[in-house]
Image: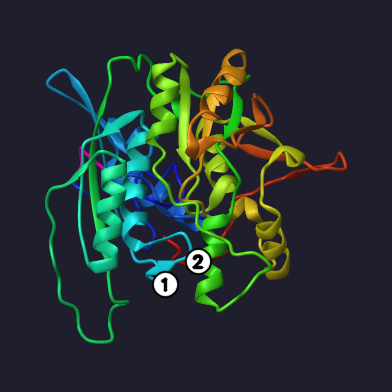
């Protein structure tokens, strides 16, 4: 569940994970090839109402209640990185996919010492319980030490009146991000490659539900939520723009990127718009509610640095456009590959 969104399948590798042809999982992937694989092979084969939502999780009615369901696997390397480890990454990633559906998380799952303690703490912070698990043995030298798979179920409260998802995005909507971008991906890369920067870069891995809950309790009419994981802001917005045949226009000067992260990206030849996050999300709301939404988000620790970065327009369709600091425009396309492999 903790990848770049709008694919209803979790494809952090080229193998889909499907529960059955009715209830499916949260997205994955990170680039154009994954998107094409989803759209041309898996969607036609498994097409159904839950999948067509193209959301972070499947939203299904059960006995008069709407439940959100998501699942994901985590094979991050290194297992322990600045700001977190595979354990809290797994719990927060699953909880966040449910939060992007407007669902209060109910359950989660699994694994070992520092990782287990971290997972326990992350689960306690999210007010969920780890209720089941599984162990597997792999051949020596064939694994990275620990793999974690999590599944989550969340309940969508009665105060969520309209469906939260790409289908509700409308021209005129404001686009808000909950904080600075790119820290998780650069934190992982710095440890993986033994890089040192002027200041330490910590992953932003965090539970996003408190910010979403605050918005819902305040009566904000949320059109869409998307956590900015694998593929970053650029991939997330491209998928939504493509699905809705709309244009999302961004202002570069407004997009928050920490100075150290920006410097690291320049040194490494990376674009922070495509770098993954594990504690950031994009919010689509009507222009009339944008300021109120930001004020609410800024009162919650995980979204204190919320800022409006753009708006939704009707044309040109299926396009994300970035207005640069000097006034020019460029198309922000979906990557054909990935900048950073296996960071969640």
Foreground residue among 271 and 295: 295
Above or below for 41 versus 135: above
Q: Position of residue 46 (x, y in %)?
A: 27, 43
Residue for point 45% across, 63% down: 343
Task: Please report contact status of discs 2 and 1: CB closer than 8 Å, yes or no.
Answer: yes
Disc number for residue 175: none
Q: Which residue is mark 2?
A: 188
Q: Which residues are magenta?
A: 21-25
- Quarter of the rendering containing residue 215: top left
Foreground residue among 41 and 308: 308
Characterize the magenta stretch by its predominant secondary structure. loop
Question: Secondary structure beneath disc 1?
Answer: loop
Question: Secondary structure beneath disc 2?
Answer: helix
Q: Which residue is mark 1?
A: 78
Q: Position of residue 292 (x, y in %)?
A: 57, 17
Q: Position of residue 299 (x, y in %)?
A: 52, 28
Residue for point 67% across, 31% down: 310
Above or below for 52 versus 180: above
Q: Position of residue 156 (x, y in %)?
A: 28, 25
């Amino acid at each position: 569940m903790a990848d770049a969104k709008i694919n209803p399948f979790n494809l952090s590798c080229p193998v889909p994970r499907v529960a059955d042809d009715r209830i499916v999982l949260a997205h994955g992937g990170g680039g154009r090839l994954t998107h094409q694989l989803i759209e041309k092979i898996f969607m036609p084969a498994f097409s159904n109402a839950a999948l067509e939502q193209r959301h972070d999780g499947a939203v299904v009615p059960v006995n008069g209640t709407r439940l959100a369901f998501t699942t994901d696997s985590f094979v991050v390397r290194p297992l322990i990185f600045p700001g977190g480890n595979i354990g809290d990454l797994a719990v927060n990633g699953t909880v966040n996919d449910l939060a992007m559906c407007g669902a209060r998380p109910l359950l989660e799952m699994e694994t070992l010492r520092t990782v287990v303690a971290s997972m326990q703490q992350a689960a306690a912070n999210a007010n969920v319980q780890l209720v089941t698990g599984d162990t597997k043995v792999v051949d020596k030298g064939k694994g990275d030490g620990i793999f974690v798979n999590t599944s989550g179920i969340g309940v969508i409260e009665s105060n969520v009146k309209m469906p939260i998802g790409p289908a509700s995005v409308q021209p005129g909507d404001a686009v808000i991000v909950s904080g600075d971008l790119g820290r998780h991906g650069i934190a992982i890369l710095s440890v993986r490659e033994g890089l040192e920067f002027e200041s330490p870069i910590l992953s932003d891995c965090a539970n996003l539900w408190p910010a979403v809950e605050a918005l819902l309790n305040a009566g904000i009419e949320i059109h869409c939520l998307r956590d900015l994981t694998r593929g970053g802001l650029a991939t997330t917005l491209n998928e939504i723009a493509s699905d809705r045949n709309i244009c999302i226009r961004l202002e570069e000067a407004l997009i928050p990127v920490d100075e150290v992260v920006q410097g690291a990206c320049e040194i490494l030849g990376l674009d922070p718009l495509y770098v993954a996050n594990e504690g950031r999300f994009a919010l689509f709301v009507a222009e009339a509610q944008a300021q109120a939404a930001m004020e609410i988000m800024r009162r919650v620790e995980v979204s204190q640095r919320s800022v409006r970065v753009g708006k939704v327009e009707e044309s040109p369709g299926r396009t994300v456009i970035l207005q640069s600091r000097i006034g020019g425009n460029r198309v922000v396309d979906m990557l054909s590959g990935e900048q950073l492999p296996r960071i969640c």
